Structures are given as structure tokens and as C-alpha cells.
Image (tube, helix red, strand yellow):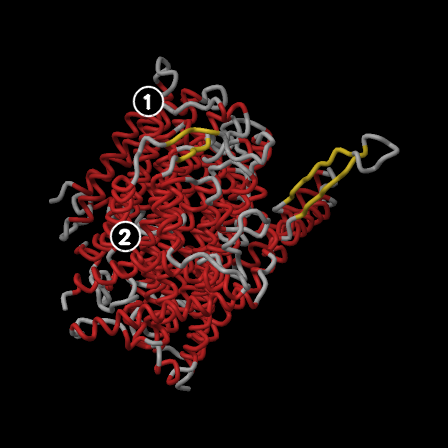
Amino acid sequence: MSIFPWLLLISVIGMPLSGLVAWAWTADKNAKGALMLSTLFAVVGVVGAAGFLRAPSAISLAALPWASSLIAVDPLSALFFLFLSVTAALVSIFAIPYLARESAHYHPRMTVLKTTLFLFGMQGVLLAASPMVFLFFWETMSLASFFLVMSDRSASSVKAALLYFIMTHLGASALLAGFGVLGLGDLTLTLADVAVASSTLSPGMLLFASLLLLFGFASKAGLVPFHVWLPEAHPAAPSHVSALMSGTMLSMAVYGLLRILTDVLPTVSIVVASAVLILGLLSAVYGVLYASVESDLKRMLAYSSIENMGLVFSAIGLGLFGRLWGFPDFAVVCFLAALIINGAHTLFKAGLFLMAGTLVSSVHSHNLEKMGGLAARMPMTGASALLLILGAAALPPFAAFTGEWSLIQAILSILPSLEPMARIILLVALSLLTFTGGMAVFAMGKLFGIAFLAAPRTPEAEHAQEAPATMWVPVFLFAIAGLFAGLVMPWILLTTPTLHLSIANSTLNPIAIFLGLLVFFLIAFLLRRALSSRTLERPYHTWDCGQPITPGMEYTATAFSGPVRFLFRNFLRTRNITTATPIVASNPWIATRTFTLDIRSFWYELFYLPLARGITFLSHTVRRVHSGVIQWYIALIFLALALTLLIAL
Amino acid sequence: MNPWILSVIQFVVVLLLSPLSVGVVRWIKARLQGRQGASPFLPYVTLLTLMRKEMVISNSTSWVFRLAPFVVLATALFFVFILPLVTVGGAGASMSHLVVVAGVLALGALFLVFGGLESASAFGGMGASREMTIASLLEPVIIMAFGAFAIVAGSPLIDRMVGMGGPGLLSHPGLILSFLALLLVALAENARYPVDNPATHLELTMVHEAMVLEYSGPYLALLEYASAIKLTLFSLLVANFLFPMSLISSASGIAGVIIALLLTITKLFVVMTLLGLLENAIAKMRFYRIQEFISGAFFLGLGGMILVLFQSL
């Protein structure tokens, strides 16, 4: 009898309880005690999940026979649980000083209660054994995060939250319908029984159900074109909640898809595989380009989440194609790469959102143009941010790099043995994936370079102070966790006995690369020490051509991304509006000029506005029925009843 | 021969020759332009002088400014360790994975960009923005160009791929396209014509020189040395894909080593002469036309890949 599944259960049950402590204990104004409790339960979850992964003869919750139809643990859910718990623990620590600082904007105790319910929902999703339980926790997660998005009660947040609400419920209803079709109407079956039940379905119905499920998960993961809520909702939430939403909630969608693919639908049709791959590639390219040109710190991170989810889904899509083409080894490597990129994304994105929270509470703005010079003023936050953006840019030897590395290597090694059509699909995928990898470097370089380097652009940035240790230590730990995960992830995945994996090609050795870079860094350092004196230096202002340099002359985020906006103008369709208002009527050249850059209009206008107009038109049409005459309404009820009976019988 | 000895030979040779190769290309350009030209050995003197000079550090900078030169030099040294430049099958050969090469190149570019941004002047910012764009767009080209070689060699290691060069280019004609893509990558990565002008930092055409404008003294020496090493290693790499047989391997004897060293020097001189000729023959591209250069390189790489894949059909 192993203790670890019980630890997971304790963690799940304890999480909402610690939130209730925040609600009930009025003396604890900033919810410090509740956050400490939730940290504790998250750590219990870390131990439980890690222990479960390392224990080869993992058992189910056999001691509770009534529970086995409700909850179940296996290595896949334990892996996701591990990442969720690590994130939850660090985020809870960060939230203690953060909520105390931001108590003017957010109600600390309410926020903590909602956050713990949110975590409870995510934990439950991972342990769900049947569609019913899965959907219950899925809704808990969605509703809690819906209320969290509008925590600051501003009009824009409420608008973002409603958009999120609509999108997430469209997705949830698609999941409900999909599970209903697969389980032949019975949602209380365990997933294994759902698999048995669905085997009697016709291929058409199976395809229909899988597309419904795919829509549900894709809209939760924020894949293009169902992404529209993500860049609105994530920035609106408090930063520690954004960290959870981006880092962990998106990976619940990945988990759900992988869960369905492993337990219920081991073989999917080529339509589903193509859909997953196309959605993934489209999101990766779209996300990375918009992340490159966006100047709002949190919104940019949200676009980068779309990109990373795109990479994860592309890897899953390639894995599905691998299965269809009869290359199970290739499929395994692709799924592994998806897991690695997803785990890496959880760590660096949660860390980056916490970092964004620190910056926003110091500079009082989301706008990158209002920052600058923060590395000198907040050295520890800056150092953590540097490590995090290296991870987010998928540079060696961080975890995301390891994931992309194994994916590209797998693609190159399988290419020669494929059919011509399959080769073309892989070449397109390879081109877009490497393009995304390159542009991610640009986006992350812009983030760090503009926010942290050079001279401060505003007085707020000028007077920014280092955050307290309780705020930067979690961020730093995320950075270290990302580095550590990159170094040991291949090894963990290969030696975890319960995963039963083997990668034929063992050239993946991030540790050697890391050590190599470190050694040469030291050599460069010693070389400089040996050859020159360290004292010969003098501070002076930047070379200014004889005219003093002001922060207004610095390159801004908008200017930095200028080349990208120009090169991809046909895709981005950004709109520049320059207006000149003459000051002196006689001379049009003396004018005040304003420059407005609208970067998100095109796709929104192309896809969503017509849809919104259509729905508004429909509802106006339907409204004509509402005449206000009660007899008419009763007649309508009868009609509806008769119609339902007609269909049902 | 022990792989570590091979690595040490390569390390010493490349590190010693890299200032010379920069000097040679400058000298040849000067001669072709009808100038006397400085001695090809001048860069050695420049680097040593810079190491002894006082540094001026801008007030707007932070610790990142001081970190950048070391990281940039470290990435260059890392490449000398892993790539097959003078010797093949060295101790670092198992790390010469094409994705690692692309990643470490991006890492070096990123830190150079950070150093450029730290100056808080429009020069540094402009260079940084342009360098970041070029480096990001080159990443897929690098993967595509090396990818075709990887498929022919059956290994993702560049150390194995060089063996496919030379006569191998004729048996797999697709690789010629990949080789051309690699050549274009080498020009862009080293901030040479037609992407950048390495001789000036006072025009708005600048990329690399604008970023290092605020560096002085030993830090500038580190950065200059790093870019000299990068130029040398790309030249040798490109040459090795044409003449892979001259590399020192574990089977070489003393005589073979000496011949290979002489050949290495010859290769460097030939490549530098050709580079000097090229830089005199063509004009620098406008920055906003760089996309044509890079997408051209990408489609050469993709074309090479497709030809290699579909050759047997």
C-alpha cells in the first residue's frame, strides 16, 4: 500500500479548505494564513505526484471501492499533477506579499478563496475517472477563473471575463456533447468503459465526437481561431492568477486531449490528426508574431502562451500522423516532446507572469514603453527574468529547447522513410516550427531588452525598487526549475519506469551542452582577468554626438519590433494612423503629430465581428416572437413540447 | 589520435588564426580598392592594445552589459569546440547537433542585442532591433540547410555531415542548394555584405557595429575576438563542406597533421580572398530588403531538402 495517492487526495481536499479558512477567518485580512495553508497542500501534492511517478508498482485507490469509478491516478495525470502542484506552491508564496501590496485593487480574501477553488478544479480534472467528474471539475475551474478575471471589478475586466465566459462555455458544451456521444449518453462510465462503448459507434459519429472534443480542448488552450478570449482574459486577471491560468489551466486542455487519445480514442482519423496539426501550427505562428509586435507586457505573454500551446498541439498532431503512418516510435517521441514543451511552458510562463506582477506593481503600468532600466534597479528580479526569457525563447539548455530539439531530430530522422505526401506535411511542419522557434527569440529578447535594459523611460521606472525576497524568490525558483527541467527532463522521461519509454537515438544530452557553455564562459572570464586590469574603468554617459541623450531617444518596444511589423505586414495587417494637427494655421509643417498603432484589428474584424453581427441579428429576429401576450407564450411552450416529444419518440 | 588531442589542435589553430583572417580580408579589400592597406597582422596588435586600455562604461547600463561580452565569446569558443573545423571527431563532436548550433547562435546573438540595447542610444537600439530580426529569421534557414545534409549523412551531427561534402555534393545534387543556403547564412551571421557593412558604424546601414558602439577596452576586445572567431569558423566550415578530405581525424599521422594545418591556412586565405572580392563586387542591401536575402536562403535550403528527399523517386 503506497502512501502517495493518499497524499494527492489530501492535497485536493485541502486546497478548497485553505480557501475557506481565508473566507472564515476575518482576523487574517490579507489571507496570509490561507495562502500558507494552500502552499502546504500544494507541497503535499508535489511529494505525492513525484512519489507516484517514481514508484513503479503504482496502485490505484483500491482501498476505496466507491471512489474508483470517480477518481483515478496514472503516470500521465501524476506528471501533470506534479507541474500543477509545483506551480501552485510557488504562486501561493508569491501571492502573500503580492496581494498585500495590491489590496487596493483586489479583495485579498475573496481572491484567495477563488484561487484555491480554481486550483481545486484543476486538481480534480487531473484525477477524474469519468466524464461526469471531469466535466464537474472542468466547470469548477472555468467558473472560478471567470470570477478571478474580473477581480479588480473594472469595466474592461468584466468585458474580458464575459468574453472568456462565452468562449469557455462553448468549449465546455462541446466537451459535454462529445463525451455524451462517445459514452452513448451515459456520462458516469469510467473512461475505459467509454472506450468500449464508443467502439460501437459509426466512423462518422466517432469523427463528430472527436471534433467536438477537439474544439472543446482547443478553445480552452486558446488555439487560433478560438483564441480571442486569451489575450483579453489573461492580462485582466491578477498576476498570480494569470500565472495559473497561462501556466497550468492551458495545460489542462493538453491533458484532456492526451487523456482522450490514450484512453478512449487510440486511433483517430486523418481528419482529426490534420485538424490538430493545422490548429497547432497556425497558433504557433500567429502567437509568436503577435507576441513579437505587442507592447503590453501581460498581453504579450498571453500571445506567447498561444504560441506555446500551438507548439504542443503541433507535436501532438505530428504524433497522431506518426501513428497513422505506422511509426509508433516517432509518435512516442512527438508526444514526449509535447509533454516536455508543455511542462517547460508551465514553468517559464508562470514565472514570467509573476515577474510581470512584480513589474506592474512597481511601475504601475502594463506597458513595456513605460519601463526600462529595471535590471539595474531590481537585480534579482532581473536575473530571474533573464533566465526565464532564455527558457521561453527555447534556447539551450532550457526545457523548451530540449522539447523542440527532440521534435526536430525526430522529424529529420523519419523524413527519408516516409511516403511523398507525408514528407511534404513534415517539411511544412518543420519550416513553421523552426520559424516559430526563431521568432520566439525575437519576442523574448524584446521583452527583456525593453523592460529591463537601458535607461528608465518614466519616473516610476526610475524609482523602482527591488521587490521583497518573498516576491523574487518564487520567480527565481521558477527560472531554476525551468533550467533543471531542461537538463534532467530527457533523463526523467527515459528512466521513469511507469512510462515504459525508450528513445532509440540517445544523442540528447543537454547537461553536456550546459557544462560546455559554462566552461567556456569561465575561460572567457579568466582570459579577461589574466590579460587586463579590472580597475581601469570609468563611468560616463553614453556617446551622444554632442547633444544630451534623453530616454525619449531610446528605442521603444514599438520601434524594436518595427522590422517584424514591416516584414510580416501582409499577415499582421497592423494599422498605423499618423495624424498631424497644425499648430500655426499658416504653416502646415509646424504640427503636433500623434501616432497610433492598432495591431489586433484585422483578424478580429475578419472572423469575430461578422459572427457577432450575425448573432445580434438572430437575437433581434427572435425577439419579434416576444409579443408580451401570455397566451402566445403558452402556445409556444406547447409547440416546443410537442416538437420534443415528436423527436424523442 | 585521442579526441581530446584533436580538440586541442583545433582550438589552438582557430584561436591563433582568427585575428589573422580578419586582417587578411581587410588587407585584400584595401588592395582591391587601390589602397595600401594595414598589415594583416594588425588585429593582433589591436586586440592586445584594447585589453590594456581603460574602459568607459555608460551610466545607463546594468550588469547585463558586463555579462554580454563573456557570453558572446563563450558561444564562439563553444563552436570551436564542437564543430569540425580543423579536425573531425574531436571531443565535442557529439554535441555538434544542428539544433544545438542554431540554438547557441541565437543565444550569442541575443546577448549581443542586450549589450546593444544597454547603451540607451538610438544607435544601439537600431542595431539591436536589426540584429535580432536577422538572427531570428536565420534560425529556420540554418535548420533547413543542415537538415538536408543530416538526411544524407543519416546523422544530425555536423561532425558527420562534413563527410557528405566534396564529391558527395555531386552524388546528391540537392546538397549544392543546401550548401549555397549555408553560404548565405555564413554571410548574414557574420554581418558581412550584403547584409551588413563590417567597416562602418556611422551609417544607418549598420547592424553589428552599432551594437558594440558603446563597448570599449577589454570588453570590446572580447567582442571583436568573438566575431573574428565566428568569421573564421564559418569560413572553415563552408570550406570543409567543399573539401572535407583535408580534415585531421583520429587516423591521421604527424605528416597528415602538418599537411592538414597547411591546408587549413590555405583554405582560410582562399575564403578571405573570395570574401574580399565579393565585398568589393556587390553593394550592401537596404535593410528592408534583407527579407529577400533570407527568404531566398530559406527556399534554397528547402529546395535542397526536397531534392535530397525525392532524389530516389
Q: Earlier in the sequence, mark 2 or mark 1?
A: 1
- Quarter holding residue A310: bottom left
* Residue B110 visible in the snapshot: yes
User: Is B251 situated above or below A229?
Assistant: below
Alpha carbons under labels 2 and 1: distance apart: 31 Å
Mark 2, other Cα within 10 Å: few <14 / some 14–19 / many ≥20: some
User: Is A366 situated above or below A267?
Assistant: above
**Residue picked out by circle 1:** A21
At 28% from the left and 42% from the top, the residue drawn is: A531
Chain under label 1? A
In the image, A420 versus A581, the foreground residue is A581
User: Is B304 situated above or below A265?
Assistant: below
Location of the N terminus of chain A (image quadrant): top left
State the image coordinates of residue B43 (x, y, percent, origin top left). Answer: 39, 53
Label 1: state its secondary structure: helix
Residue found at the very far right of the displayed protein: A586
**Residue picked out by circle 2:** A76
At 45% from the left and 47% from the top, the residue drawn is: A305
State the image coordinates of residue B87 (x, y, percent, origin top left). Answer: 25, 68
Residue found at the very far front of the displayed protein: B36
State the image coordinates of residue A87 (x, y, percent, origin top left). Answer: 32, 38
In the image, A390 versus B202, the foreground residue is B202
Give the amino acid at mark 2: Leu
Give the amino acid at mark 1: Val
State the image coordinates of residue B279 (x, y, percent, origin top left). Answer: 52, 64
- Quarter holding residue B100: bottom left
Label 2: state its secondary structure: helix
**How many discs mark residues in the rendered view?**
2
* Residue A209 visible in the snapshot: no
